[in-house]
Amino acid sequence: MDSDKVKQIVEEAIAANPALFLVDWKISSDDKISILADGDEGLSVEEIVRISRYVEHNLDREECDFALEVSSPGVGIPLVMPRQYKKNIGRILEVTLDNTVLEGEIVEADDEGVTLWWETREPKQLGKGKVTVEKEEKVNYTEIKKAIIKITF
C-alpha cells in the first residue's frame, strides 16, 4: 500500500473541516489503516463516518485490500499536540516530566507550552500547621514525557 497516497487522502479528509485535526495515523503490516483524529469541539460520529467514507472512496480495494479504523483519542490517551492542550483548557492535566509529576488545571496553552494552576498545602513560615498556597507553572511541551487529562466527577 502506498503510504504517501494514504497520508494525502487522510489529510484531505481532515482538512475538509477546519475544526478537525489529525493526531496520528498508521498502516499496519496487514494493511489496516488507523486514523486518530480530534476536533476543537470534539469529533462527532458524523465526522468519523465522513472521514471513513472519504478514505474508503479514494482508495482502490482492487489494488490493495485494507481495513479502516477512524476514531478519536479516548480517556487515558496522552496528549501529543498543542491544539489538544488548547481544547482542554479548564480541565485537570497530569503531566509527567523527567523527575516529577504535576497535576493541575490547564489555565493557558500556546504553541510552546501549557500553564497549570493548582492548590497545595505547605508548612507555615512561622509556627505550626499548614497553609493553602496557589501555584502556577508553565511547562514547555519539550519537557513533557506524558500528559493525560484526568477525569473528575
Image: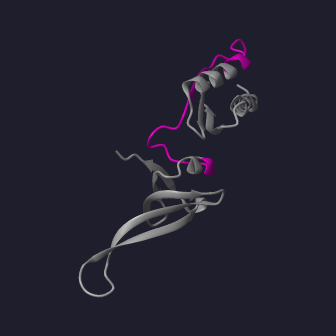
Against 109, is 78 above or below? above
Q: Tell me the magenta residue range.
A: 56-83
Residue at 55%, 64% (x, y): give it. 139
Residue projecting furthest to the top? 62
Q: In what quadrant of the picture does the N terminus appear?
A: top right
Q: Main secondary structure of the magenta part?
A: loop
Q: Is residue 30 at least partly visible in the picture?
A: no
Q: Is residue 95 left or right of residue 112?
A: left
Against 105, is 30 above or below? above
Q: Is residue 8 left or right of residue 25?
A: right
Percent coordinates x, y for residue 106 in the rendering: 50, 56
Q: Is residue 43 left or right of residue 6?
A: left
44 within the magenta span: no
Percent coordinates x, y for residue 153 in the rendering: 34, 45
63 within the magenta span: yes
Residue at 68%, 14% (x, y): give it. 61
How was this image coloured? one colour
How many discs appear?
Answer: 0
Q: Quadrant of residue 104?
A: bottom left
